[in-house]
C-alpha cells in the first residue's frame, strides 16, 4: 500500500470512536459532552488531515480486505470526497460544541444524553465514510448507518409522539432512497458483475445513460430534497434538536448532492438530456422551496423549506455543468459545477448558522411559532446579529459569501445562453429569470422571519424572560461567520481547490482546452474588493451621521400610530399578514386551510373561539397523502394476517417452508 | 467616473422637475426646481425623534440604503467611460447591491412595531420581487444580443443592429421606465402624495424616520431616479462622441422627469390588489424582447 499512514489514520479514528462510545457509558453526566466533543474533535483532525493532503496533492487509493464475502473494498479519497469531508467535519464540530450548550437543560436525563452523543459520533464517522467508500454494498452500509443514527438523533425528545412520527416519516423515506440506490447498484452488478464504483462507468459506456442515472438521482434526490422527494425535510428539521437540524440541513442533505456528483463523474453520454432534466427539476425545486418557506409560521420549518430552495440552486449549478459537458464548453462546466460545489460549502455555513441561532431563540422562548415572538433583538442582541448575517448571506446578497457562489451560477447561465440551440437558450433564459425570482422571494421570506422574531415588541408574554445564550453556543456561530467572511473576501483560496476537483473529475488530461475557473477568479476577487469598499462606505457614512446627529436634539417617543392612542402589542403587523398578499397570488401552490367556527345566528353571548390557518405542502397534500391513503386502504384487506395469535404465525412459517420445499422439488427455484 | 458626476448633477434637479411639471399640469406655479434639495438640507440640520421600540437596525438602515444606491451608481457606465466598477456580469452585482438596501429598508420598517409600516414593507418586498425577473430577462437578452455581459460593453455595442433592434430598444425603454417607477415607488404603482397610510407603499415604511435619516432616505430616492434615468439614457447613446452624448444625457433625463410628472398628473394609480399582476406582466414584455433578440440572431429556423 502506498500510503500506510492514511490507513493508520482512518483506523485510529474508528478506534477512537469505539473507545469514546464505551467511555460514554461510564463517565458521569457532566463529562459526557466533553468526551463527545473530544472524540468528534480528534476524528475531525484525523480525517481533515487526510482530506487536506488530498486537496493539495494526489488522490488516495486504499483497499480494505473484508473477507471472502465482499472481496476487497476499494476506498478512494479524491478531491470531491475531500471537499465534502471537510464540510462535514467543520459543521459536525460546530454542531457538537453548540449542542453542548443547547442540551444543558437536559443534564438530568442522562440515558438520553448518552445515546445522543453515541449516535452523534457514529453519525459523523458514517458521513465521512460515505464519502470514501467506492464499493456499492459497503457504501450502502455506511449510508444506512448514517440514516439510522441521524434518525435517532432527530427523535431525541422521544416522549413527544409528534417528534417520533416525524422520525418515522424520515426513516421510511430514507429507506425508499436506499431501495432505489440498491436497485441501481444491483442493475450495474447484473450487467458488469462488479459492485465497485468503477463498474458504473463501465455500465454507462455500454448502455443508455439516462435510466440508471434517474434511478440514482431519485435515490440521492430523496436525501438531498429535490421535489417531489422533499417531504421529509419540513418534518424532520423542526423536530430535531437545533444542532442536529443544523448539521442535517448543512451536511446530510449535501451527501445527496455528493452522490449525484459522484454518479455524474461516471457518465459517458447523454449529458444534454440529463442536464435538462436536472436543470428543470432544480429550478422548480428552488422556486417551490422558497415559496413555501415564505409562508411558514414555524421558523424552523421555514428554514427547512429554505434548505430545499438552496438544494435547487446547487442543482441548477449541476445542471449547468452537465450542459457544459454536453456542449463541450469547459467554461460552462467550470462555472456550473464550481458554483454548485461552492454553494454546497456556503449553504452548509449559513444554514447551520441560521439553525443554531434559531435554536438559541427556541431554547430561550420554548416556541417555534414566530407570531408569538418579537423584539428579541433587545434581549438577545448577539443571536439577532448572527441570524441577520445568515439571512443576508442566504439571500445571496453581497458583501457575504452567498453572492460569490450565486454569481458563479449566474455567470454560467449567461455563458450558456449563447449556446446554439434555441431550446437550450430559452431554458437558460428561464433559469436566469427563475433564479432572480428565488432571490427576490428569499428576501421576502427572511425579512419576514427576522422582522417578526427579532424586531418590534414581544407579541405574547413568555414564560420567562429570554436572555442571551451562553458563550458555548455563541462561539461556534462566530467561527462560522469567520469562515463565511473568508469565502466572501478571500475567494481565491476556495476557488483553486474547486477548480482542481472539477479538472480531475470531469476532464481527462488530454481533454479540450482547459479554460479554468481560475480565470474567473480575478472577477470574483474584484467583487470581494468592491464588497470591502461597500462596507467601508457604510462605515464612513455612519461616522459622518453619528458626528452630525450628536449635535442635534434626539427624542424618544412612541411609534406613530396614525393618531390612535391605545395601540397594544398584538396590533403589530404580523408575519402572516406580511406574507399574505404573496400567498394569495400563489394560492394555486400554497394550499391554505383554515379552521374556525362562524358565529351562529342565535349566539348572543359568543364564547371564546379560535382561528387556525395552516399552509399545506402541495406535493404532500395532493400527491403523497393520496398515495399513502390508497396503500393503507388496500393494506386494510390483509389485516386478518396480523391477528395476534401465535399459532397462526407459526403456521405461516411452516407454510413458507413447505412452499419453499415444493418449489425446490419442482426445480422452480434452484 | 463621468457617469457618477453626471448622475449626481441629474439627481439635483430630477425630482424638482417632476414636482414642477405636476404643478404646471394642475395649473399652479409650484416651487423652484431645487426645492427638494433645500428640503433635504433642512432635514440634515434637524433633530430626530425615534420610536421607543426601535433598535440599532432602524438607525443604521438609512445609511446602508444610501450606501447601496451609491454603490449601484458606481456600476453604471456612460458612453465610452466605464463605471468605476465594471466587470463581466456587473449588472448582477448591481441588482443584488440594491437588494441589500431594500432588505434593510424593509426590516427597518418592521423595527418600529407599527401596525401599518409592515404593510408597506410587505408590499415593497412583493413588488420588487416581481420586478426582478423583468430586469434579469431584459439584461440577459441584451447580453445575448451583444455577446457581452457587462453594462458598459452591452450598451456600447448595442446600436449597430437592424431595425428590430429599434423595436427592442423601445420595449426595453418601456420596461426600464416601469422598473424605475416601481423601484422609486412612483405613480402607477404607488402614489407618493397619498394621505392614507393604508394605501401607501414606500411612504408608510418611512413614517417614523425623521431628521438626518429622513434626509438620507430622500437623497437616496433622488439618486435612484437619476440612476435609472442614466440606464435608460445609456440605451440610446451607444457610441456617440462626448460633445453630443453629454447634452443628450441631460435632455433625456429631462424628458423622463417630465414624463414621470405627466404620468403622475394624468393617471390614476393601479388597484393595490392587482399591482403585483401588473408588475409581473412586465416580465412578458421582457420575454418579447428576448424573442426579438432570438429573431435578430436568426435562431428561429
Image: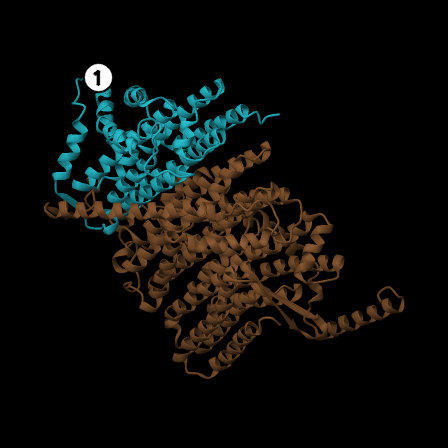
Quadrant of the frame with the N terminus of chain A: bottom right
Q: Is residue A311 left or right of residue A484?
A: right
Colour in which chain B is drawn = cyan
Residue A46 position in % (x across, y down): 49, 71
The chain carrying label 1 is B
User: Considering only vertical position in the picture, is A54 above or below B217?
Assistant: below
Q: Residue furthest top?
A: B27
Q: Nearer the viewer, residue B178 or A230?
A: B178
User: Considering only vertical position in the picture, is B173 above or below A397?
Assistant: above
Q: Is residue A153 left or right of residue A266?
A: left
Residue A257 position in % (x across, y down): 55, 55
Check disc 1 and report the residue beneath it.
B24
Asked if residue A609 can be seen in this view, the reply is no
Q: Is residue A187 left or right of residue A124?
A: right
Few, some or many C-alpha atoms within 10 Å of disc 1 (few <14, some 14-19, many ≥20)? some
Colour in which chain A is drawn = brown
Q: Residue furthest bottom?
A: A26
Residue A224 figure quarter: bottom right
Residue A445 position in % (x across, y down): 40, 47
Quadrant of the frame with the C terminus of chain A: bottom right
Q: Residue at x 37, y 45 (%)?
A: A526
Q: Residue at x 38, y 52 (%)?
A: A488
Amino acid at each position: 500500500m502506498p500510503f500506510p499512514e492514511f490507513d493508520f489514520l482512518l483506523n485510529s479514528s474508528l478506534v477512537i470512536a469505539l473507545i469514546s462510545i464505551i467511555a460514554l457509558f461510564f463517565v458521569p453526566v457532566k463529562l459526557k459532552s466533553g468526551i463527545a466533543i473530544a472524540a468528534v474533535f480528534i476524528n475531525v483532525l484525523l480525517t481533515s488531515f487526510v482530506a487536506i493532503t488530498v486537496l493539495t496533492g494526489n488522490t488516495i487509493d486504499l483497499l480494505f480486505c473484508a473477507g471472502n464475502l465482499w472481496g476487497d473494498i476499494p476506498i478512494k479519497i479524491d478531491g470531491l470526497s475531500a471537499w465534502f469531508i471537510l464540510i462535514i467535519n467543520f459543521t459536525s464540530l460546530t454542531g457538537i460544541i453548540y449542542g453542548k450548550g443547547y442540551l444543558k437543560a437536559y443534564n438530568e436525563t442522562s440515558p438520553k444524553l448518552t445515546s445522543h452523543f453515541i449516535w452523534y459520533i457514529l453519525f459523523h464517522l458514517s458521513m465521512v465514510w460515505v464519502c470514501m467508500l467506492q464499493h456499492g454494498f459497503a457504501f450502502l452500509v455506511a449510508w444506512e448507518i448514517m440514516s439510522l443514527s441521524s434518525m435517532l438523533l432527530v427523535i431525541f425528545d422521544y416522549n413527544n409522539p409528534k417528534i417520533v412520527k416525524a422520525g418515522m416519516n424520515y426513516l421510511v423515506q430514507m429507506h425508499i432512497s436506499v431501495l432505489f440506490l440498491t436497485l441501481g447498484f444491483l442493475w450495474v452488478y447484473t450487467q458488469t458483475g462488479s459492485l465497485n464504483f468503477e463498474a458504473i462507468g463501465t455500465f454507462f459506456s455500454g448502455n443508455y445513460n439516462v435510466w440508471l442515472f434517474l434511478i440514482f438521482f431519485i435515490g440521492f434526490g430523496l436525501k438531498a430534497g429535490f421535489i417531489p422527494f422533499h417531504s421529509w425535510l419540513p418534518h424532520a428539521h423542526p423536530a430535531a434538536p437545533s444542532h442536529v437540524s443544523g448539521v442535517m440541513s448543512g451536511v446530510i442533505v449535501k451527501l445527496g448532492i455528493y452522490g449525484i456528483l459522484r454518479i455524474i463523474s461516471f457518465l459517458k453520454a447523454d449529458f444534454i438530456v440529463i442536464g435538462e432534466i436536472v436543470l428543470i427539476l432544480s429550478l422548480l425545486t428552488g422556486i417551490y422551496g422558497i415559496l413555501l418557506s415564505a409562508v411558514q409560521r414555524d421558523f424552523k420549518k421555514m428554514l427547512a423549506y429554505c434548505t430545499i430552495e438552496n438544494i435547487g440552486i446547487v442543482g441548477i449549478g449541476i445542471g449547468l455543468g452537465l450542459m457544459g459537458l454536453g456542449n463541450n464548453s469547459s467554461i460552462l462546466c467550470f462555472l456550473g459545477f464550481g458554483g454548485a460545489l461552492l454553494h454546497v460549502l456556503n449553504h452548509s455555513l449559513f444554514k447551520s448558522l441560521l439553525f443554531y441561532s434559531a435554536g438559541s431563540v427556541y431554547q430561550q422562548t420554548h416556541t417555534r411559532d414566530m407570531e408569538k415572538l418579537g423584539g428579541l433583538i433587545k434581549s438577545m442582541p448577539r443571536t439577532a446579529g448572527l441570524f441577520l448575517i445568515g439571512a443576508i448571506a442566504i439571500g445571496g446578497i453581497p458583501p457575504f459569501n452567498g453572492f460569490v457562489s450565486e454569481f458563479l451560477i449566474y455567470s454560467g447561465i449567461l455563458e450558456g445562453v449563447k449556446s446554439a440551440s434555441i431550446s437550450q437558450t430559452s431554458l437558460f433564459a428561464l433559469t436566469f429569470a427563475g433564479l432572480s425570482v428565488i432571490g427576490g422571494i428569499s428576501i421576502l421570506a427572511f425579512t419576514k422571519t427576522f422582522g417578526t422574531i427579532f424586531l418590534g415588541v414581544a407579541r405574547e408574554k413568555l414564560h420567562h424572560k429570554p436572555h442571551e445564550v451562553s458563550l458555548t453556543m455563541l462561539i461556534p456561530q462566530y467561527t462560522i461567520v469567520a469562515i463565511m467572511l473568508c469565502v466572501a473576501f478571500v475567494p481565491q483560496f476556495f476557488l483553486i481547490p474547486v477548480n482542481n476537483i472539477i479538472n480531475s473529475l470531469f476532464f481527462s488530461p488530454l481533454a479540450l482546452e482547459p479554460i479554468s475557473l481560475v480565470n474567473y477568479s480575478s472577477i470574483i476577487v474584484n467583487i470581494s474588493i468592491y464588497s470591502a469598499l461597500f462596507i467601508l462606505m457604510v462605515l464612513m457614512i455612519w461616522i459622518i451621521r453619528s458626528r452630525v446627529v450628536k449635535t442635534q436634539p434626539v427624542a424618544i417617543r412612541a411609534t406613530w400610530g396614525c393618531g390612535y392612542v391605545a395601540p397594544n402589542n398584538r396590533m403589530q403587523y404580523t408575519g402572516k399578514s406580511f406574507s399574505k398578499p404573496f400567498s394569495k397570488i400563489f394560492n394555486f401552490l400554497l394550499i391554505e386551510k383554515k379552521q374556525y367556527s362562524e358565529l351562529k345566528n342565535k349566539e348572543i353571548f359568543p364564547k371564546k373561539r379560535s382561528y387556525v390557518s395552516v399552509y399545506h405542502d402541495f406535493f404532500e397534500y395532493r400527491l403523497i397523502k393520496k398515495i399513502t391513503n390508497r396503500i393503507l386502504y388496500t393494506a386494510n384487506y390483509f389485516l386478518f394476517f396480523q391477528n395476534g395469535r401465535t399459532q397462526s404465525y407459526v403456521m405461516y412459517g411452516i407454510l413458507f417452508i413447505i412452499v419453499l420445499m415444493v418449489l425446490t422439488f419442482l426445480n422452480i427455484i434452484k | 467616473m463621468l457617469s457618477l458626476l453626471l448622475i449626481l448633477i441629474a439627481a439635483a434637479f430630477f425630482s424638482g422637475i417632476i414636482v414642477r411639471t405636476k404643478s404646471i399640469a394642475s395649473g399652479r406655479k409650484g416651487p423652484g426646481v431645487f426645492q427638494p434639495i433645500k428640503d433635504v438640507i433642512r432635514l440634515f440640520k434637524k433633530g430626530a425623534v425615534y420610536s421607543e421600540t426601535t433598535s440599532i437596525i432602524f438607525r443604521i438602515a438609512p445609511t446602508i440604503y444610501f450606501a447601496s444606491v451609491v454603490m449601484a451608481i458606481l456600476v453604471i457606465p456612460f458612453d465610452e467611460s466605464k463605471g468605476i466598477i465594471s466587470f463581466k456580469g456587473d449588472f448582477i452585482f448591481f441588482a443584488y447591491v440594491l437588494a441589500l438596501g431594500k432588505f434593510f429598508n424593509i426590516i427597518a420598517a418592521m423595527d418600529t412595531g407599527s401596525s401599518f409600516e409592515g404593510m408597506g414593507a410587505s408590499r415593497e418586498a412583493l413588488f420588487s420581487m416581481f420586478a426582478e425577473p423583468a430586469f434579469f430577462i431584459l439584461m440577459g437578452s441584451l447580453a445575448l444580443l451583444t455577446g457581452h455581459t457587462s453594462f458598459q460593453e452591452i450598451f456600447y455595442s448595442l446600436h449597430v443592429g437592424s431595425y428590430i433592434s429599434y423595436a427592442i430598444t423601445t420595449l426595453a425603454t418601456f420596461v426600464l421606465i416601469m422598473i424605475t417607477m416601481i423601484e422609486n415607488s412612483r405613480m402607477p404603482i404607488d402614489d407618493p402624495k397619498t394621505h392614507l397610510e393604508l394605501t401607501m407603499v414606500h411612504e408608510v415604511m418611512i413614517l417614523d424616520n425623521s431628521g438626518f435619516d429622513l434626509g438620507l432616505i430622500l437623497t437616496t430616492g433622488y439618486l435612484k431616479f437619476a440612476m435609472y434615468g442614466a440606464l435608460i439614457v445609456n440605451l440610446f447613446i451607444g457610441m456617440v462622441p462626448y460633445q453630443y452624448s453629454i447634452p443628450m444625457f441631460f435632455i433625456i433625463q429631462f424628458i423622463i422627469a417630465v414624463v414621470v410628472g405627466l404620468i403622475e398628473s394624468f393617471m390614476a394609480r393601479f388597484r393595490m390588489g392587482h399591482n403585483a399582476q401588473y408588475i409581473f406582466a412586465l416580465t412578458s414584455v421582457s420575454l418579447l424582447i428576448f424573442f426579438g433578440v432570438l429573431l435578430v440572431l436568426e435562431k428561429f429556423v
